Amino acid sequence: MNILICDATPHWSGGANRILLYSKELTKRGHTVTVCCLPGSGLSNRLPKENIQTSTIDPKSDFNLFIIPELIRLIRDNKIDAVDICSPKFYWVASLAARLTRRKVILTRNVPYRKKGLKKYINRILYYKLVDRIVAISDKIKRELIEDFRIAEKKISVIYDGIEIERFTGTNAEPCSIKNEKYVAAVVSRLDPNKGLECFITAIPEIVKTISTVHFILVGTGSIEPQLKELAKKLKVDNRITFTGFRQDIPEILCGVDVTIMPSPEEGMSMSALESMASSKPVVATSGCGLVDIIVNNISGIIVKPDNSHELAAGVISLLQSDYKKIGMEARKIVEEKFALQKVVNHYESMVNELT
């Protein structure tokens, strides 16, 4: 089958990584994948290196009807069977192009942001009239779609992000070494608003008051990095946290930490948290994340309330004072069972075959 995936994410993200992994695995299975993404985006730079066919289009807005002819040409030239739309900027234009060419439309929901008022009504038209199947990357997103739009349950497929588990065995990496510190806790995230990173840094003084031998590493880059560094300095914990910048050696970094923290108040299904769990490193995550349906509290990780630095601090302290290595092994079992790339792509492949 021939699949067109449309995504308008400018930077590298968990969603972009999902598209990369799915595209590679589907190509191995003999399918043809074409990805339509933004010029200069992370996907446009990475996919050609993996021999994934890429076309660059910038919709500029959610309702730029002028690009529909270009999308129609892309669909026809590549003999596309199904169009999978992963970003709001492509929702309407790509679904209309697919409908005009009588192709099946899949809409992938990566984030849990809920609509209100007029936007909610407009999205109802999209879901009911233009989309054949909705993919939710977490059970939480599926529940909210049904609650908000009364979409038939059979129209929504929960298909998780996939993990290349073999990359996260830790057998070829040397642990991190932070002088005079017993524990290392990591946050792997885009340093952007709405990721809960201010809450994380605000929690550090409370954590180190109880556990003085812990160091934190913040892996990633983004628009609020200067503000986060200033906040750490203001709270006098700048010596307790290392900003690593953007890194591609995430498996090696995770090998050297004890626990990870996912402070985002709203997240579909955090790829960085899944990679941590695949590395047998337990996660402190918020109940606003799709992990709330995956992690068993105090057994395979810790779930805390979002946007609450005291709860976050208590969760980190509790995890570090527990048998966190055992909890990490339980987390690894969950990823092996539910998130192995081959398993989730099997599900995706079956869904597309059913539609086409």
Image: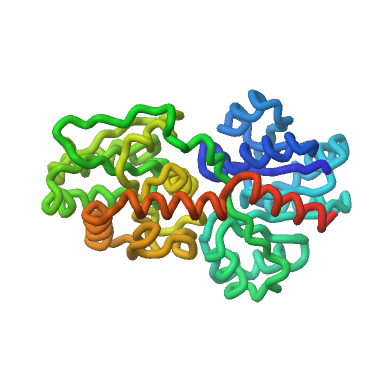
Please indicate, yes or no, whether residue 25 appears anywhere in the rendered image.
yes
Please indicate, yes or no, whether residue 309 appears anywhere in the rendered image.
no
Q: Residue at x 62, y 37 (%)?
A: 20
Where does the N terminus fall, quadrant-wise?
top right
Q: Quadrant of residue 172?
A: top left
Q: Residue at x 75, y 42 (%)?
A: 4
Q: Quadrant of residue 26?
A: top right
Q: Residue at x 59, y 54 (%)?
A: 160
Q: Residue at x 56, y 60 (%)?
A: 138
Q: Quadrant of residue 347?
A: bottom right
Please state the horizontal and vertical placement of residue 306, each as a whole percent of the image: 35, 62
Q: In the figure, 189 relative to 137: above or below?
A: above
- The residue closer to the viewer here, 198 or 254, is 254
Q: Is residue 341 left or right of residue 331?
A: right
Q: In the figure, 306 relative to 248: above or below?
A: below
- The residue closer to the viewer here, 198 or 25, is 25
Please state the horizontal and vertical placement of residue 42, each as a whole percent of the image: 56, 32
Q: In the figure, 223 relative to 317: above or below?
A: above
Where does the C terminus fall, quadrant-wise?
bottom right
For the image, the number of numbered tags is 0
Q: How is the image coloured?
A: rainbow
Please state the horizontal and vertical placement of residue 77, each as a whole percent of the image: 87, 35
Q: Is residue 119 left or right of residue 56?
A: left
Please state the horizontal and vertical placement of residue 114, each as a whole percent of the image: 53, 65
